[in-house]
Amino acid sequence: MGKKLTILIISFITTIALIGCSGSEGSERDRPLVVATTTIITDIAEEIAGDRVEVHGIMPIGGDPHIYQPVPGDARMIAQSDLVLLNGLQLEGWLSELARHAGGTRPMISVADGVSALEDEERHGEPDPHAWFDVRNMHIYVDNIVRGLVKVDPDGEEEYVQRADEYKKKLDELDTWVREQIETLPEDRRILITSHDAFRYFGEAYGVKVMALQGISTEAQPQTKDVIKLVQTIREHTIPAVFIETSVNPRMLEQIARDAGARIGGELFSDSIGAPGHEGGSYLGMVRYNVRTFVEAMKEDPITQK
């Protein structure tokens, strides 16, 4: 079933559900309802909003926003929302039509608006949506979230700005820490090989060469030439480790590692933060976990090549 047909069916179900509830749930809320698409945006929005706003996320932990299929509850949640926060940069291709059919009106804020987007030349210059892996970009995300929150709760502006300023200080500390960690690696070990091309912003910001089996979207199918190139790169540079991702099937990259004589250096978070209680269970924690996992694995001795 195509995405458009799926969304139309969801929209019909949502319309019937909304008629049945007659808007009673919305009238009972004493706080604005903000819906965020990805777990990363949800986490940051909750940090900035505090308890003034009710923040609901669409994506589950570990979900893949590139291929996500909306469910009726998503459309109903959007229909009742006061604000929708999305990443933008063509990440949530399933969202715009879903929102149009949800009924009602609400501001929709792209939190990546203002980011200098990297382009994917293999996909006709489409923007790379993974801007969150350059920690400096998150200042823009935070400012856009504040802008959205003030739209639906003007009285909370002072609180939002204060919490945003505090969060930006943490971002600056994190950015400095990432640079310090990468500098502990020899330059020839600053090569990150992953399942899909989610880390280009990270590579550009922190001086790491990034290679991936798939393109910027997990919908892209790996090409034979890409597999061959990865195997050759691993062997030529005696790369000790490659990295799977929590939201991507690891099977093919695991096979490439075996063929090329590398180990799996660990599992990285790319399109989703980790579960509550995990070190990577927040945006800040996710970045720290990823960088620590990468640096520690790349300091290990390579497997003896056969």
Image (cartoon, rainbow, N blue to C red):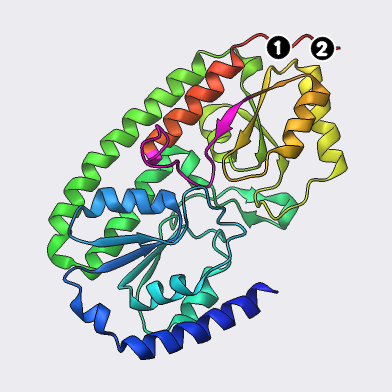
Pointer 2: what residue? 305
Residue 161 marker: none
Camera-side residue of 243 and 205: 243
Camera-side residue of 145 and 127: 145
Do labels 1 and 2 touch, CB within 8 Å? yes
Q: Quadrant of the N terminus?
A: bottom right
What's under tag 2, amino acid-wise?
A: Gln
The answer to if 156 sits in the magenta stretch is no
| In the displayed structure image, the side of residue 266 where residue 50 appears, left or right | left
* Mark 2: few/some/many CA within 10 Å (<14, 14-19, 20+): few
Camera-side residue of 33 and 211: 33
Residue 46 placed where, x, y %?
28, 52
What's under tag 1, amino acid-wise?
A: Pro
Residue 90 placed where, x, y %?
57, 61
Residue 218 placed where, x, y %?
67, 51
Is residue 106 shown above or below 53? below
Range of residues picked out in magenta: 265-283
Query: Main SS of the magenta segment?
Result: loop
Pointer 1: what residue? 302
How far apart are labels 1 and 2 at the CA level? 8 Å
Residue 226 placed where, x, y %?
81, 39
The answer to if 276 sits in the magenta stretch is yes
